[in-house]
Image (cartoon, helix red, strand yellow):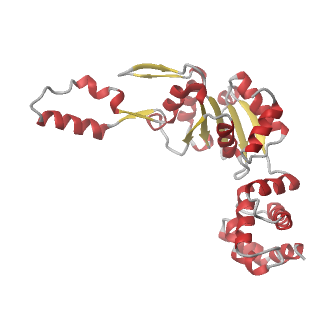
Amino acid sequence: MESVEQIIECLAQQRYLADEGLGVSLYLAIQLGRPLLIEGVPGVGKTEVAKALAASTARRLIRLQCYEGIDVPQALYEWDFGRQMLTLRAGEASSSERTPVDQFFSERFLIERPLLAALRAGSNAVLLIDEIDRADDEFEAFLLEFLAEFQITIPELGTVRAQSQPLVVLTSNRTREIHDALKRRCLYHWIDYPSHSLECRIIAARAPEVPAKLAEEVVSAVFRFRDLELLKPPGVAESIDWARGLKIMGASSLADSVPVERTLGLVLKEKDDITRVRRDGTLQAISGMGR
């Protein structure tokens, strides 16, 4: 990737429409060899950045999905205990020479988890550490050390070092604050909801079967939903799904109230939000957009 413009163009070929700010952040992350922390509200395309970047650079995408309670072995490596036991029992039942104990802790029985896989893949991989804000402080502290050295020690096998660094993208929905120590080691980019015109272009790229007029009405309606104090405002993913769903249901406009009613579950994901827009006149208002 030799320029910001080239990155933006390559992402566009993967149907990811990035603005200049994101293009600059990705370009600098690649050139400086630094992790990129991307924050934003759910549904604005943070995870898709890593997917599109891996596809556009022909790198392997390695994804570590964070969650509450995730620990180091689940992220690094584990020993295949079940296979070890089967091999041991098979050796005991055989009259041939038994397998030495130290051979039970060899590559044959090692289960790679995402971080070890990324070390071994090196620059041929994009490591996506998704929703780091869901992990606890202890795991974040471990990750800080891992990203600083790009190496781990497996007591039975020795130290594994990355011959070349993978490109690392971390995402956060900001359900909690990420520690400053981790932020200092990353480049940072915030992804907000796209503009009206950009969101229309995104629907056109991701759902080309949807007529432009219907896509524009969907985006206008979604903007209206976002202005409400909903429990879960719709993201870009919901805009795309709703536009596709309306097209499948035969709607040519939001004035077709029956398909709009039937497909609300594609754009609103909380019962209270759906109840609210049905009761406060919002549905009638967005139906008027199509007239």
Residue 268 visible within the image: no
Q: How many marks?
A: 0
State the residue in front, 62 or 188. Answer: 62
Q: Position of residue 174 (x, y in %)?
A: 69, 44
Q: Position of residue 162 (x, y in %)?
A: 54, 21
- Is residue 170 depicted above or below 43 in this figure? above
Q: Quadrant of the N terminus?
A: top right
Query: Quarter-wise, where is residue 211 in the image?
Result: bottom right
State the residue in front, 57 or 270. Answer: 57
* Horizontal relation, residue 175 to residue 157: left or right: right
State the residue in front, 83 or 274. Answer: 83
* Horizontal relation, residue 46 to residue 138: left or right: right
- Is residue 43 depicted above or below 282 in this figure? above
Query: Quarter-wise, where is residue 226 in the image?
Result: bottom right
- Is residue 20 depicted above or below 246 in this figure? above
Q: Position of residue 103 (x, y in %)?
A: 27, 25
Residue 207 visible within the image: yes
State the residue in front, 171 or 84. Answer: 84
* Horizontal relation, residue 151 to residue 179: left or right: left
Q: Looking at the image, which residue is at 56% across and 30% down?
A: 143
Q: Looking at the image, which residue is at 77% across and 34% down?
A: 7
Q: Quadrant of the C terminus?
A: bottom right
**Seen from this angle, which residue lies furthest bottom?**
258
* Horizontal relation, residue 179 to residue 18: left or right: left
Query: Quarter-wise, where is residue 13 in the image?
Result: top right
Q: Position of residue 66 (x, y in %)?
A: 55, 43
Q: Looking at the image, which residue is at 78% across and 80% down?
A: 257
**Seen from this angle, which residue lies furthest left?**
95
